Image: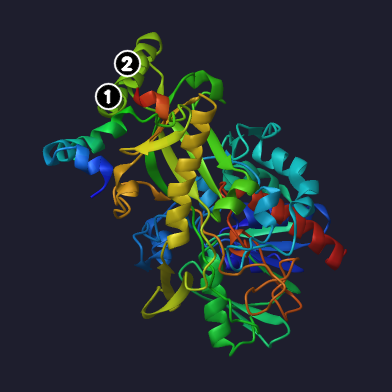
């Protein structure tokens, strides 16, 4: 068993694993191009029209 | 001179060098040109001066494939031909329409736009047109094009007096050729039918079939069958590559400034793709016609937009409060890919009163055309967005892959192909001068010689080609 896991309880490790997906919320996503053309429900729009 | 029967014509001993079959825009134009050059011409017109049900009955036929108009409704059989119900929209085929398209088989003409340009000022006089303004590029993909609404010249009315006074042109009404007889080199005679009965045979040095975009094929198919191939010796393409301009409402547009595109009192504006866009998307030519949407229709469009882009809908509502004209219906007419399977055939089951088989028209729209319609609307919508000119909504039946609606315009009543122009005798019927391949004295005029249809109404190009053929024959025949 590694040093890291020996120092942490099983409960702590499980909590950390469960929390991992939520971290992606803080990831910086590339900004969508507001001028990009999108087709929704037959409408041909600029992405910024959807704001 | 105008005669009401072949009997009356025969009584005056007028010897015609050229026999023109049909008095529509093509027949009348060629007759006037030849008459002005001093060449004696007889024009055989199947109908009289006025519409009659009896005459129209000769045009009955059936269509196999996609829904189409009744064949006795979509054309007219009296003096002046189908110019009698023409709407008057004018534009000449573009240069690009004459060029072969690598992505669409059997496209390309043996002549170019430059070959008809010398005749356009004459066409403007005939059709009473002002000059066309140049196309306006809206983007790299879309052009704002101009269609001019002429006074819808009725050729029978406009030129009746002139033809009546002419010493070189004789118009014989209620008379037509049920068939041409030929020996594989020349047409030797025409079998006539006048005022409801057999009128014997007629001979002339030259014959020009100008009976319309459906009837030219019928006449030549029947004549060829009766003469064992002696009228159209190279007949593989005869009747084939028939085309129309299918026309459907493809969606709506909201415009930032409707008046930016006004061209005339009809409040209609027309848009077409650039050649580069057609090449990139591998689609055919098309024309999008903007027709102003009535107020209740605009409210429906805004309600629909509110579900997708609420703030945009709010902006449109504001526009509507400022100017009631801010939305348009988008009607799309497009160029059909020329297909040999779209063709005029002779009915095996039904004949007219003169014993000539009626038309069986085989006509179907292709997948390439469906793609042209959808991608064309996307192209137009994208241009409006990029240029901040407006927004487009494509109709549900198109985006969902549904069937073509059956309650719309269907097509333009534009009958093209069947005796197309070309150099390959297996894919064409006439040469670049409209002379039937292998024949010395048989020519064909009208939109049946079109190789491709472009997107615009055909009459202007038809009259230009008629001027060109009249000019050519004047030189060939001399006086």
Is B391 situated above or below B186?
A: above
Circle 1 sits on which residue?
B306
Who's the residue at 86% across and 62% down the image? B475
CB under 8 Å between discs 1 and 2: yes
- Would you identify the image quadrant in which residue B396 lies? top left
B459 left or right of A34? right
B185 left or right of B280? right
Quadrant position of the C terminus of chain B in the picture? bottom right
> Toward the viewer: B19 or B11?
B19
Picture coordinates of residue B34, whole percent (x, y): 78, 57
Residue occupying the far top of the picture? B322
Who's the residue at 39% across and 63% down the image? B57
The chain carrying label 1 is B
Q: CA distance from mark 1 to mark 2?
A: 8 Å
Quadrant position of the N terminus of chain B in the picture? bottom right
- Number of labels in the image equals 2
Of labels 1 and 2, earlier in sequence is: 1
Is B299 situated above or below B226?
A: above
Who's the residue at 71% across and 39% down the image? B124
**Disc 1 packing (10 Å; few <14; some 14–19; many ≥20):** some
> Toward the viewer: B437 or B57?
B437
Picture coordinates of residue B26, whole percent (x, y): 64, 55
B336 left or right of B394? right
Residue occupying the far left of the picture? A11
Residue occupying the far bottom of the picture? B228
**Quick one: SS at disc 2?**
helix
Q: How is the image coloured?
A: rainbow
Is residue B293 visible to us here? yes
Circle 2 sits on which residue?
B314
> Toward the viewer: B85 or B454?
B454
**Disc 2 packing (10 Å; few <14; some 14–19; many ≥20):** some
């Amino acid at each position: 068993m590694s040093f890291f896991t020996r120092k942490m309880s099983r409960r702590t490790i499980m909590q950390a694993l469960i929390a991992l997906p939520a971290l992606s919320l803080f990831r910086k996503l590339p900004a969508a191009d507001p001028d990009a053309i999108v087709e929704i429900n037959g409408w041909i729009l600029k992405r910024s029209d959807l704001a | 001179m105008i005669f009401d029967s072949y009997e009356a014509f025969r009584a005056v001993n007028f010897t015609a060098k050229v026999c023109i079959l049909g008095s529509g825009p093509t027949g009348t134009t060629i007759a006037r040109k030849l008459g002005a050059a001093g060449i004696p011409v007889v024009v055989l017109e199947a109908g009289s001066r006025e519409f009659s049900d009896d005459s129209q009955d000769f045009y009955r036929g059936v269509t196999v494939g996609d829904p189409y108009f009744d064949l006795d409704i979509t054309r007219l059989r009296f003096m002046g031909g189908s110019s009698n119900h023409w709407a008057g929209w004018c534009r000449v085929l573009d240069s690009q329409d004459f060029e072969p398209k690598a992505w669409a088989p059997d496209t390309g003409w043996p002549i170019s736009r430059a070959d008809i340009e010398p005749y356009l000022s004459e066409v403007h006089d005939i059709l009473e047109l002002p000059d066309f303004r140049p196309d306006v590029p809206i983007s790299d993909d879309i052009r704002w094009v101009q269609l001019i609404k002429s006074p819808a010249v009725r050729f029978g009315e406009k030129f009746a007096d002139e033809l009546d006074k002419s010493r070189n042109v004789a118009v014989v009404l209620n008379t037509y050729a049920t068939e041409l007889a030929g020996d594989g080199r020349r047409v030797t005679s025409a079998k006539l039918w006048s005022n409801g009965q057999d009128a014997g045979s007629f001979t002339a040095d030259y014959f020009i079939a100008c009976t319309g975009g459906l009837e030219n094929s019928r006449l030549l198919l029947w004549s060829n069958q009766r003469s064992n191939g002696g009228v159209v010796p190279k007949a593989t393409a005869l009747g084939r590559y028939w085309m129309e301009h299918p026309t459907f409402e493809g969606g709506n547009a909201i415009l930032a400034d409707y008046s930016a595109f006004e061209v005339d009192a009809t409040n209609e504006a027309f848009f077409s793709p650039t050649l580069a866009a057609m090449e990139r998307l591998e689609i055919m030519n098309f024309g999008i016609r903007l027709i102003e949407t009535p107020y209740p229709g605009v409210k429906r469009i805004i309600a629909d937009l509110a579900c997708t882009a609420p703030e945009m809908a709010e902006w449109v509502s504001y526009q509507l409060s400022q100017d009631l004209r801010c939305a348009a219906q988008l009607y799309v007419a497009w160029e059909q890919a020329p297909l040999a399977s779209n063709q005029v055939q002779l009915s095996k089951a039904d004949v007219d009163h003169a014993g000539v088989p009626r038309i069986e028209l085989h006509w179907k729209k292709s997948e390439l055309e469906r793609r042209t319609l959808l991608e064309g609307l996307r192209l137009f919508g994208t241009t409006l967005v990029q240029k901040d000119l407006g927004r487009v909504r494509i109709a549900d039946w198109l985006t969902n892959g549904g069937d073509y609606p059956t309650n719309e315009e269907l097509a333009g009543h534009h009958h093209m192909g069947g005796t197309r122009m070309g150099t390959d005798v297996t894919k064409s019927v006439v040469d670049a001068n409209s002379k039937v391949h292998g024949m010395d004295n048989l020519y064909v005029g009208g939109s049946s010689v079109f190789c491709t249809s472009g997107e615009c109404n055909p009459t202007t190009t038809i009259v230009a080609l008629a001027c060109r053929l009249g000019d050519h024959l004047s030189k060939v025949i001399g006086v």
